[in-house]
Amino acid sequence: MSDKAYNVAIAGATGAVGGAMLDVLTRRDFPIKELRLLASERSVGKKLQFRGQDIEVQLLSEDAFTDIDVALFSAGATRSLDFAPAAAKAGAVVVDNSSAYRMDPEIPLVVPEVNGDAISQYTNRGIIANPNCSTIQMMVALKPILDKVGIKRIVVSTYQAVSGSGASAIAELQQQAEDYAAGKEMTSSVYPHQILFNCLPHIDSFLENGYTKEEMKMVNETRKIFADDSIGVTATTVRVPVFYGHSESVNIETNSKITAAEVRDLLADAPGVKLVDDPTNNKYPLATDCAGDFATLVGRVREDESIANGINMWVVSDNILKGAALNAVQIAEAFVAKYK
Ligand code: 25A
Ligand code: L14
């Protein structure tokens, strides 16, 4: 990175992901000249701390992006559709965390460790899309295997934390736990059912094909990021009563044979991956261990004995960090390093 400093805006700064963006910018020492915090009317005037300074939240509006170099968006798809084009028009490059633009063929969908080169397509619309959290961590774990032996098919089941649905869902799980402990009746408003002590096979809305949108994001985004529409992907996404950290059971069929030991060797050196695979000593990736960690944890690597060329693994990452805020900041870093 050059020794320049940049004007950065965060749209949705008061949310679960926006707050993590502030943290990640600090932890990675992103070179910032001005940081502008944007949110809805509800939060205007509220002060957030950044590098020991109070910064007042301003209204997210079309005029909020004057002189901004990089705008990190995490205020939901509707806000991205409403305001990202104006930010781009004002000269900012938008890194958008929502699903609004991910499958737009003109807009790059980027996991820096996997397809960082696609950032060059920012010139098309001034927008770079951040993939879905569950997709990102799977890409980080599979990329070394894809490069080595090719992947024919992926079967993935997810166990997703409530923080993915934002601050209100974190509060809902917390409240249900408190109500349970106090012997009170539990209520649900973010999710259609109680999430405490439960597993909901329902993330985002249902589609006509019987899958959820979240499941089809994993299918379509994987193919776009790996730039290969021939890869078969099928997903079942499940919400579990965990605050931070998505876990995934990933089963792949490769084009040619690779042993579990070879996969472990590859992953031990893979960018963004931490191999945690010592089951006899009870060491495997856990959501409770990934919270706050920038790495994607991979373990339980084993051969699928039901087919000739298959591998199973367990992949865990902090959905708010690598799944959202960290990946967005990494995209911003790669962008300014090369193009600004
Ligand atoms: O709109 P959608 O598409 O349905 O999606 C929005 C959801 O996506 C989450 C986000 O949760 C939100 O729930 N989200 C975004 N990116 C994500 C990702 N990559 C993601 N989830 C997972 N992975 P959130 O709570 O973390 O962030 C919400 C942020 O968006 C700002 N915002 C909302 N509407 C806005 C807006 N900003 C500008 N204009 C608008 N119209 C929001 O700011 C927050 O920063 P805020 O000021 O509206 O909220 C401040 C606090 O208020 C709480 N809150 C949220 N909704 C309500 C509420 N309080 C009262 N009533 C409400 N209806 C929030 O918890 C926040 O702390
Ligand atoms: O598409 O509720 O990035 O866990 C990711 C989190 C959609 C909602 C996305 C959740 C969001 C999802």
Image (cartoon, grey):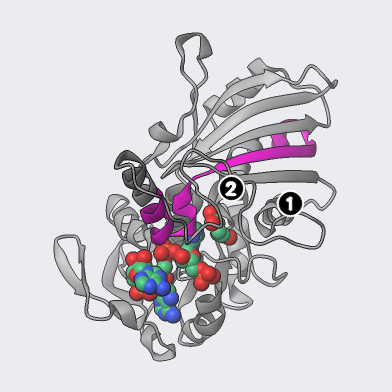
- Give amino acid for label 1: Val
Residues marked 1 and 2 touching at CB (< 8 Å) = no
Mark 2: which secondary structure?
Answer: helix
Left or right: where 150 falls relative to 179: right
Residue indicated by mark 2: 134
User: Is 201 contained in the magenta span?
Assistant: no
In the picture as drawn, the residue positioned furthest to the bottom comes out as 63
* Number of other residues with Cα within 10 Å of mark 1, as a class: few under 14, some 14 to 19, many 20 or more: many
Residue type at numbered disc 2: Ser
| Mark 2 sits near ligand 2, with its Cβ under 8 Å away | yes
Residue 8 at what x, y percent from top left? Answer: 35, 71
Where in the figure is residue 11, as x and y percent of width and height?
40, 73
Q: Position of residue 186 (x, y in %)?
A: 41, 50
Going from the N terminus, do you reach mark 1 or mark 2 first? 2
In the image, 116: left or right of 195? right
Q: Residue at x 81, y 24 (%)?
A: 309
Magenta stretch, residue numbers: 144-173
Residue at 21% x, 63% y is 50
Quarter the N terminus occupies: bottom left
**To which quarter of the image does residue 64 belong?**
bottom left
Classed neighbour count for the residue bearing mark 2: other residues with Cα under 10 Å, few (<14), some (14–19), many (≥20): many
Tell which of 93 and 17 is nearer to you. Answer: 17
Would residue 158 be seen by someone viewing this image from the given angle?
Answer: yes
Split into quadrants, the picture shows ligand 2 in the one at bottom right
Spot occupied by residue 331 in the image (x, y as percentages of width and height): 49, 59
Q: Which residue is mark 1?
A: 219
